Amino acid sequence: MSSRERILGRVRRALADVPDDARPYEETIVRGYLREHGQRSAARTVDLLAENLADYRAIVHRCADGQLPELLARLLTAHGSRSVVVPPGLPSRWLGAVDAPLVQDLAASTAAELDEVDSVVTGCAVAVAETGTIVLDGSPDQGRRRITLVPDHHVCVVRVPDQVVSSVPRALERLDPKRPLTWISGPSATSDIELDRVEGVHGPRTLEVVLLGGS
Amino acid sequence: MSGTFVGMPAFPEAAREAVGDETLRGNLRHATHTIRDKRARAVAELDDWAALREAGKRIKDHTLRHLDRYLVQVEEAVTAAGGTVHWAADADEANEIVARLVKETGESEVVKVKSMATQEIALNEALQAQGIRAYETDLAELIVQLGKDRPSHILVPAIHRNRGEIRDIFRSEMSEWGRPAPEDLTDTPAELAEAARLHLREKFLRAKVGISGANFVVAETGTLVVVESEGNGRMCLTLPETLISVVGIEKIVPRWQDLEVFLQTLPRSSTAERMNPYTSMWTGTGGGRNGEGDGPRTFHLVLLDNGRTDTLADEVGRQALRCIRCSACLNVCPVYERAGGHAYGSVYPGPIGAILSPQLRGTESEIDASLPYASSLCGACYEVCPVAIDIPEVLVHLRERVVQGGPAVRNGNRVVLKPAGGHAAERAAMRAAQWAFTHPGALRTGQRLASRTRRLHPRTLPGPGRAWSGSRDLPAVPAEPFRDWWQRTRGGRDGAK
Amino acid sequence: MRVALFLTCVNDTLYPDTGRAVVKLLTRLGVDVDFPMAQTCCGQAHYNTGYRHEAEPLARRFADVFAGYDAIVTPSGSCGAMVRELYPRMGERARAEGRGDGLAATLAPVVPKTYELTEFLVDVLGVTDVGAYYPHTVTYHPTCHGLRSLGLGDRPRRLLEAVKGLELVELPGAEECCGFGGTFAVKNSDVSAAMGADKVRNAQSTGAEVLCAADNSCLMHIGGTMARLRTGMRPVHIAEILASTQEAVTA
């Protein structure tokens, strides 16, 4: 007997005492909880996102469409970035004002090469206001997961209010589970020393989020 | 690694040592109290917490009720997404599968994401025996591995260490494993984290094989979820060419939407955060294969039983399988706070460990038979559990199994357990008490005897009585029991006081 | 209303003053309370130590002895919780073991009629000011089963706050277990003692003369620790405080 059959058989025997439960999943799982906590205007939801991002030590900027290239250039210069990795589908005008060399991420690029890069600029798939979270789904403006991991400085552009949802349930509704997903809430951190939060371990130690909207 | 739980003494003896260790008591007290208050605040932010808790409980119960169906669905979905699914009935089989898969890649080292399942099966030791070196990359796991130590907490395995001890371990041990710690390393947490970052980066960059567990597996999509803080998880899950995930069969949730419950309850219960810094979700080799080169090209899922189906067979105990390993129960437990994690003799310490270990491993060993008693039944664990596991109920149920024996399932076979040894005197006392309590005349005689001889009673006791009177005075026996007063005065109505 | 006092075996044998205080208090509030002499023990120690089957005759006996009353009042959070929370569970377990509904049916009637003392005062009698006088500084320790199993909430506090002359001071870490835990106190005596010592240290830090609780089992452990540590503090059951009046301070 294979272990597959053995385990499935054990499961069935283990449940022999349980009365047949023909109720479908939908009837069993009572979702008495809220889809989102509180009611807010779109603008207030963006404000909440900004507050919660900042609460977990992300640096938050707001800018209108036309100011983005200038802002990104300023942020990268201020960070002292000598190179910036760019996902393949990032709108090219975003980094139009950046002086530092732009590195294209190629499938053949190694992790060690990526480790030499200072910064990365990406878009995002969705942002969650209640938790201060940005979610990346590997779309062309976000690129492979590794490019937002190995460099020490991540600048993420969120289009507001379109890409902002209130809550975790709302975010999951928008996401495609078939895509590789990364939920990011603040810079890399740990609670492993005396159960107290310290920022900055393996992921980017600086996370800057640009809330892009309006003219 | 020399850290092992084999041959642990029973809980009371192990705890005695911990209670006497002032440094350990201080470390545990500081850490658990810090997180307790924070958790309470994080939970209070959500006014629908009770409903989230109930939904989480129901999702898990429903999954367990139909686990055979959902396991097959996971297998189909993961396979369809380019992954390979393996089934392991026990620890040995899981270790063999993983060792074989690593060897097939031609590699002799792997990077690991913190995983309770691989701790449980002692995967690192098994790999080492096959010539494969496993590097733990979670900061606390690294501290444990470098310190040749044992984990003492589910979330923070090195919770028993304070910053000074961690610095000493880094300074003396890091060079054995790779990049040494900086000469001038201090004990500030930021510097310690930086030292770990530098030490592990070279390992991440060259790793070809990653090993992980998973917090959740979504049956309908085949998606695995790993919740973490540091980014070491992301490194292990995305940089290597091969990823092997060892996952307990109870980690399944039926649908994608179910994650909306647990992604709210787990971080708040665990690290007391609205959301943990990083959560990775992947489905098979999606991303790695389709020319995008995003993540491993090869993905293996090892589904682990190792006592879980035995636990599932126990109608009271099976609720322990709802556990999402948040460790909130450890952090609020007054016994854990004083005894420390090592006393529980298992990778699962604290209240959840006290009900999980004796079920996964059976109650035959001394330590496992003592774990159900490692609780004052105060109920704080049940109160904070985000999936409403009634831990006191299961503890009492397992006490019954220890003292009375009875039917159980071990390794898939129905067995009838004998009562554990060492409880004969207690059993006799319980039966005598029961007899007295069903014969009030005898009870009253005993009470009166105690009252009449009360001036002769010592305030401390010799022998086994020292368990009480070693630290507490005995209560004085009154001149007469209440029932005599009641009978004499008809409840004071006759005027006597 | 026919009201019975379920005193508990521990109080009957070791703390008769608590029983007298309950009788005095309820009588003062116009309740004609009876003490059925056939009562013994609810079976909690048996049940919680793993001897559920040995606890069953005691539970049956309890149901039998108290069957004829409208309300059963007990000055013990944990014995109250035994009846209210665990008797139904015993019935369910017997059913699951294929022994039918008999035990469940026998125990069911007494379950909703059983009240811990402060519940009875606040919920049934609807009083918080029981006319008590107690000129002492008191800190209150909510015992675990009262707090978590019965959900006594702020009832004991409200009763204490209404006592004249009583100054109530906050106990740090109040909701943490004192470490008694029935047989836990001897099976894991080192951890139990450490918990007790921490509880007593917290109590001492309040400067109160008296530590009050609604359960003498916990007070036996806390009081024994206080005496051993020579704190000079006294453990007092809440019934004894509430029974005290200007004319006679009972505790």
Image (tube, grey):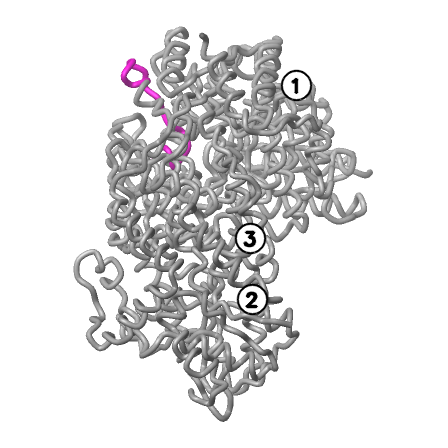
Residue behind mark 3: C107
- Quick one: A181 or B377, which is closer to the camera? B377
Residue behind mark 2: C72
Q: Chain of mark 3?
A: C
Q: Chain of mark 2?
A: C
Say if the magenta span includes residue C116: no
Taking A34 as reference, is B232 above or below it?
A: above
Taking B6 as reference, is C13 above or below it?
A: below
Label 2 crowd (10 A; few <14 / some 14-19 / many >=20): many
- Quick one: A147 or B474, which is closer to the camera? B474
Say if the magenta span includes residue B141: yes
- Residue B477 in view (yes/no): yes
The quadrant where residue C250 appears: bottom left
Taking C29 as reference, is B53 above or below it?
A: above
Q: CA distance from mark 3 to mark 1?
A: 54 Å
Range drawn in magenta: B127-143
| Image side of residue B196 versus residue A186, left or right | left
The location of residue B445, given as percent across then percent down, is 31, 68
Q: Quadrant of the N terminus of chain B?
A: top left
Q: Which mark is residue B260?
A: none
Front disc: 2 or 1: 2
Q: Secondary structure at mark 2?
A: strand
Q: Which mark is residue A178?
A: 1
Residue type pointed to by label 3: Leu
